[in-house]
Image (cartoon, coloured by chain):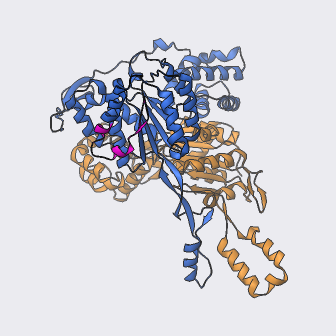
Chain colours: A blue, B orange
Amino acid sequence: MDETLTNGLRSSPARIAVSFGRILRGLGLEVPVSRVTSFIEALGLLGLHERDSVYWAGRATLISDPEEVGAYNRAFEVFWEQKRPSGIEVELPPISVSLAVDTEDGTGDIPDASDDHAGPTLQLRYSPTETLREKDFAECSDRELDELRRLMSGLRFASSLRPSRRRLPSKYQTRTPDMRRTLRSALAMGGEPIVRKFLQKDRRPRRLVLLIDVSGSMEPYARALIRFAHATVVGRTRVEAFAIGTRLTRITRELSSRDPDAALRAASQAVNDWSGGTRLGATLREFNDLWGLRGMARGAIVVFLSDGWDRGEPEMLGEQMQRLHRVSHRQVWVNPLKHTPGYAPLARGMAAALPHTDDFIEGHSFESLERLAEAVSA
Amino acid sequence: MFNFPDSPAAVSAALSDHHYLTDDGLSTVVYLAITMQRPLFLEGDAGVGKTELAKVLAAWTGGELIRLQCYEGIDASQALYEWDYTRQLLHLRTAEASGRAESDSQAVEDELYSERFLIRRPLLQAIDYAGEHRPVLLIDEVDRADDEFEAFLLEILSDHTVTIPELGTFGGDKPPLVVVTSNRTRDVHDALKRRCLYHWVDHPDLEREVKIIRLKAPEVDADLARQVALAVKAMRGMGLYKPPGVAETIDWSTALGKLGESALTEETISATLGTVLKYREDQERVSSQGIEVIMAAAANG
């Protein structure tokens, strides 16, 4: 037996295989028991006396992704060859760094790469747009907001699809025959339906319902999200929008107007006049009773934008979220506070809502809105 | 007569008899797949010899190669079985014309769903195989099929039986040797991979590639074979859209052999570049800045 494989002397192959599987799991690989049993079976066929066959038996049975090979190799060295992980030292070639700056017209000036450096050149790129993408909406100047608005108008996406009742001609054989087209082609063949035609279900984008908290601190984010909603309208998604917080205001109609900002301002004006503060639970109940459960939220993707500060009863918010969740397809909560370091959803309203939330997203910057777009179209 | 191999080395020897050179990893995995009777899941860039392996396995084991090419929208009727609707229709009309339909309607109806009108698609052919040897079932480019089809494959691959409601259950005693290939255009579901032995097929190393060229294009002499292998290796490092695989290497060598070349020169490279690089952009890239690089690489060998 190979000297490096001394692990095998005292315990059975099965025991060794299981502990090797555990090491791989420790490195973050997914190794279900079924894989370990395949590994044991393979070891039984190949034996433990050759390094290479043990190595390849493990690679064939324990992992199934070329990305996992690196971790597997490391684990193999540590476990079977008893190399100290710290003993492996890799000498890195020198990396030269060059900085490219985006000019006003957007064409970057890239320095000539054929310099006399031996190592690879790392291109760093600075662009004002890049940093703006990550900047908190609340910290943006008016000019920057204008710039972001331009960026956002370039955002195009549609919400995820649902099967619709309409049917379309299908290329493939399905369960639904297309009588009309079958008959028509039969006419050409003396009335014999030799070629059969089929239908398939059409698919349409799901409705998107935005519930936007318009209390003072949320205003810059609310404005950004409204712009975002505009982008979805362009993507042929049906969008409904409501301002929530103190009372429910439907702002869908204004969304299609030229100035959605004005609509929001009017809605938040109403909030400022009102002295009670945010009552998320009560307004959500109003939404559920008047709109949501009646049909608007059925099979829809519901996006909440709020920091989760609720002056009312948090139980009520939890209960209403649950009611809504039973009819909606997906609930996404966008909380701009989430990106603050050390944030935990401790606000009572937020804690109550979280169990009924499918996706919890930051939503404080343009980049996180792109993540929202992903969640909505998933 | 095919005998079960008793070691990975035996697999390697047998496959090289059939002009397919393996490395340690691949021969071990093939050995395990044959002895453990598990499907073999091969992933790798296009043209590294995944499909070829299945063909060679069939030639070696003497089993028939049954190939299922996957594509978007493939479903059970194209993969498993289908009723021959047109012939059923014809059968009915004949029965009507001869008057059998009235006199013996029950029998005519029973005949409609008999084996006579069953079209066996590759999966059913492989599972319910009548021949002497285990067939080799090649499920090619599974990453092109839809997710639903993977779930369906999973069911077939785990019990090797198929139930056709009108006829009963098929398959069982001679499970095929299954080779599943993927170009990794998308990730195949874990559940499918877990039932298989997995192997990532890499580009061969230099020595093996030279041997492959000598084997597949015997008219090319040893020096040229080495030059070609070095040149291809240089091309793979150039960040092309489609780095050449072994298939392209063999094509290129064959082309050079047919032209009677004995060494790589700038003219021969640009004349035969179309056999290695299949994108205009790649060709332009290589001819604008790369031919000297390739020549240098080939010369260094």
Left or right: A70 in relation to A323: left
Residue B97 position, x and y percent, is 74, 87
Q: Nearer the viewer, residue A32 or A271?
A: A271
Image point 37% across, 34% down: which residue? A369
Counting the numbered discs, the total is 0
Relative height, residue A32 to residue A106 (above, below): above
Q: Is residue B296 visible?
A: no
Which image quarter holds the C terminus of chain B? top left
Image quarter of residue A141: top left
Image point 27% across, 46% down: which residue? A258
Q: Nearer the viewer, residue B122 or A137?
A: A137
Return the residue found at the far bottom: B98
Residue A114 position, x and y percent, is 19, 32
Left or right: A52 in relation to B81: left
Residue B50 lies in magenta, yes or no? no
Image quarter of residue A123: top left
Image point 68% across, 79% down: which residue? B90
Residue A150 position, x and y percent, is 25, 40
Residue B272 position, x and y percent, is 31, 55
Q: Is residue A54 visible?
A: yes
Left or right: B265 in relation to B79: left
Relative height, residue A347 to residue B204 (above, below): above
Q: Nearer the viewer, residue A198 or A57?
A: A198
Image point 34% across, 25% down: which residue? A216
Image quarter of residue B80: bottom right
Q: Nearer the viewer, residue A291 or A35?
A: A291
Region in magenta: A242-263
Residue A245 lies in magenta, yes or no? yes
